[in-house]
Image: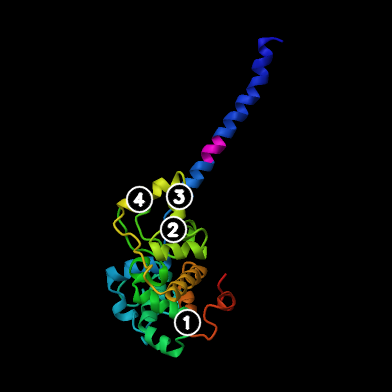
Amino acid sequence: MSTAYFKIRGRPRNFYSLLLAIFGVLVFVAWVLYRTAPESAPIARGAKYAHIRGCIECHGQPDNPNADANDQACSDKNHMPWHPEYNVDCADVLAYFETVRLAKTFQVRLQSNSQNLLISGEQLARKYHCFNCHGQLGQGGFRNSRSFKGYVPGYFGNDFKILTEDAAPDSVRQWIMYGVDPAILNEPISGRIAKVFFDRQAINMPSFKSLESEEIETLVNYVIALNQYGPMTASLVRSYARDSVATSGMTDLASSRNESGWK
């Protein structure tokens, strides 16, 4: 056969090899973007703005008659002569206002139904200061310098999914007990990268292995329950408030989410 034959026959091979290489690069880039894309929730964004502007002085009271109930009311008030102008998504600050009011009703809700699994989990989360790092109701947002994404992850989204093997109870339990899931560090490549960031970041997850086993399991179930709510809007915070005093607690979480319009 002639040399020309091999060149002609060889071109498709080179072409397909090039396509395969490009596809591999694109897959790798997509994987990196998936792993590194920052996440935020309405509550965290609203908290950041509200603390700067001092919004909660008026909007943080549980019985405040001027507390905004919806996005339209929030937008309308911005045009009132007596209300300072603001530059923020109304949905974000409304979600944060609800968590402030929720925190102020904690004791009332606890006394209403202390056996509710949500309120029991919330009690432990507040007792052990989980929200101080993971944000109100685990909605993230707190800065963590020199960490992989620059913040402490919340209990929602891809961050939580990657770190806990898609909200696997055993993985969540490992994080609570030891401050990390060893399975992450055992990964051949990503485990080494994770260790570098864990060693250098300003805030590391503390170990709570000294807690009673019942408390650990309550926290595991509570964190997973919060994950099911996803990034919480003001409406979902109000739904959570109702769920936290319901007799069903976390046992009928999925059905209660459907009834309140959560998809």
The disc labelled 1 sits on which kind of residue? Ser
Marks 3 and 2 close (CB-CB < 8 Å) = no
The x and y percentages for residue 210 are 36, 70
Helix, strand or loop for disc 3: loop
Q: Using the image, tell me which numbered label, if any, was put on residue 181.
A: 2
Residue labelled with disc 4: 197
Marks 2 and 1 close (CB-CB < 8 Å) = no
Marks 4 and 2 close (CB-CB < 8 Å) = no
Q: In this picture, which residue range is highlighted in magenta?
A: 22-26
Residue labelled with disc 3: 186
Q: Nearer the viewer, mark 4 or mark 2?
A: 2
Give residue 206's quadrant in the image.
Answer: bottom left
- Choose the circle earlier in sequence order: 4 or 3: 3
Residue labelled with disc 1: 244
The disc labelled 3 sits on which kind of residue? Asn
Confirm whether residue 88 shows in the render. Answer: no
Q: Residues within 10 Å of mark 3 (few under 14, many from 20)?
A: few
User: Does the magenta portion include 238?
Assistant: no
The disc labelled 2 sits on which kind of residue? Asp
